[in-house]
Amino acid sequence: MAIPDKIEKDVLHERLSSICPDPTVPKRSRIPALARRMEMTSAGVYKWINEGKVPPARVPELVRMQEEVFGRVRVTAGQLNPIFSDRNKS
């Protein structure tokens, strides 16, 4: 079974929204809040969503941020970019 090379836009949007560093932020403002935390523009995060994956270089940063903010990982590396999926490891 082939592993998809990207994630559905609405699924990735929901995953990125769920790791917003401030869960009190209204849902529509979570992507901009995440972008600010990562010191980038909202357009950059929306580009990831449209491409269906987070660039591999940014995935560890997002995982670390979740550990720092929430004390656990809410969205795994494989859920942000299929290249990190356990199924890809041999």
Image: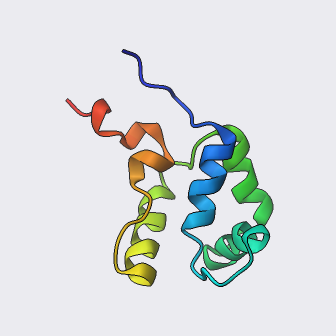
Q: Nearer the viewer, residue 70 or 46?
A: 70
- Total numbered circles: 0
- What residue do we see at 40% from left, 45% from top? 78
- What residue do we see at 60% from left, 48% from top? 12
Which of the image's four quarters has the C terminus?
top left
Q: Nearer the viewer, residue 59 or 74?
A: 74
Q: Quadrant of residue 83?
A: top left
Q: Quadrant of residue 8?
A: top right
Q: Residue furthest left?
A: 90
Residue 77 vertical placement versus 88 (above, below): below
Q: Is residue 26 left or right of residue 17?
A: right
> Where residue 73 sits: x, y (%)?
37, 67
Q: Is residue 44 left or right of residue 8?
A: right
Q: Is residue 66 left or right of residue 20?
A: left
> Where residue 14 sits: x, y (%)?
62, 55
> Where residue 46 sits: x, y (%)?
75, 53
> Where residue 88 sits: x, y (%)?
31, 31
- What residue do we see at 63% from left, 39% from top? 52
Q: Residue furthest top?
A: 1
Judging from the image, the colouring scheme is rainbow
Q: Is residue 90 left or right of residue 37?
A: left
Residue 21 vertical placement versus 86 (above, below): below
- What residue do we see at 66% from left, 53% from top? 13
Which of the image's four quarters has the N terminus?
top left
